[in-house]
Image (cartoon, helix red, strand yellow):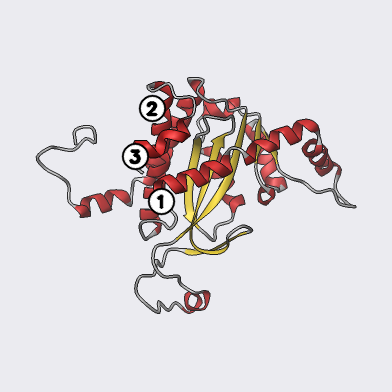
Amino acid sequence: MKVCGLSSVYLPSRRTFDRRLKTISKDIKERIALMGNLFVVEGLVRSHVVATDTALLKSKGNVWHRSSIKEGIVPCSGIDTDARWGYSHTKKWIFGYKLHIICSTDVPTIVPLSAYVTTANVSDKPIYSDVVSCLSPKTLKKIHYMVADPGFSSKKLYDLSMKRGFQLVCPVKRYKNTSVERLRLVDFYESTLGQVIYSKRRISIEPLIEHIKSVFRIDPVPSSGIENVRGIIMLVILLYQILVYYNCKVLKNDNPRRDIKYMIGC
């Protein structure tokens, strides 16, 4: 209780916890960035190449069909009216929320460096700037490349990345009327260096997201309402960082991902 900052005599009510959960996400977002920076400055991870991706998370309870959403009708109880429909090539249509995340890429210590949660219908591209902005300035200075899937490929994001001091690397196709500027991106992606850099995505952010979902059982999400869901998922990311840090610094574990499930009793 004392570790959590709570009195051993007085335990806050459930309503108090619920109120705090609705306002905690902004504070947690900053703490996630600080923890990510701690990994970088202490040399526990390298941030020369980082990866970004998103993950759709199913909502709690029944789904709200598009026709009912359009008409503003809630046909039955147990529907999270904050959740929305989102699409991914692997899971198709999902009614729920979306986790946006940036992580380190060098195995075995792969950790989140920045994160945010939106409804599932929010596109990856508009949130990219916000998730990048969450990164600590010290971490940003060390980043050379950001790898991402084709959904992040746009001139606006390439330019934004360059202004931040790093290069965004996405699969880029060559077309008949492709501009000279875009051809440079194609040439780099197809080069040996570009392929080595991009290959880090498959062994880092994809398994990291699946591991977090498996360990903390956040798919489907355990709560309803955007603020509640955002607070819980962001707390999960922060807790994951803390567990990895403890494994690295205290237990001197060279493969922290392997033991995290056992630490939380899963």
Q: Which residue is mark 3?
A: 264
Where is residue 42 shown, x and y percent of the image? 48, 20
Q: Secondary structure at mark 3?
A: loop
Lower position in the chain sequence, tag 3 or tag 1: 1
| Residue lying at the far left of the rendered structure | 9
Mark seen at residue 246: 2
Image quadrant where one finds the C terminus:
top left
Question: Residue reaching furthest right?
Answer: 176
Q: Horizontally, is 48 left or right of 41 in the view? A: right
Residue 182 vertical position relative to residue 31 in the rendered view, above or below: below
The three-letter amino acid code for the residue at tag 1 is Arg
As measured in the structure, the alpha-carbon distance from the residue carrying label 3 to the one carrying label 2 is 13 Å
Q: Quadrant of residue 166?
A: top right
Q: Are marks 3 and 1 in contact (CB under 8 Å)?
A: no
Marks 3 and 1, how far apart in space? Answer: 12 Å
Which label's residue is closer to the chain start, 3 or 2? 2
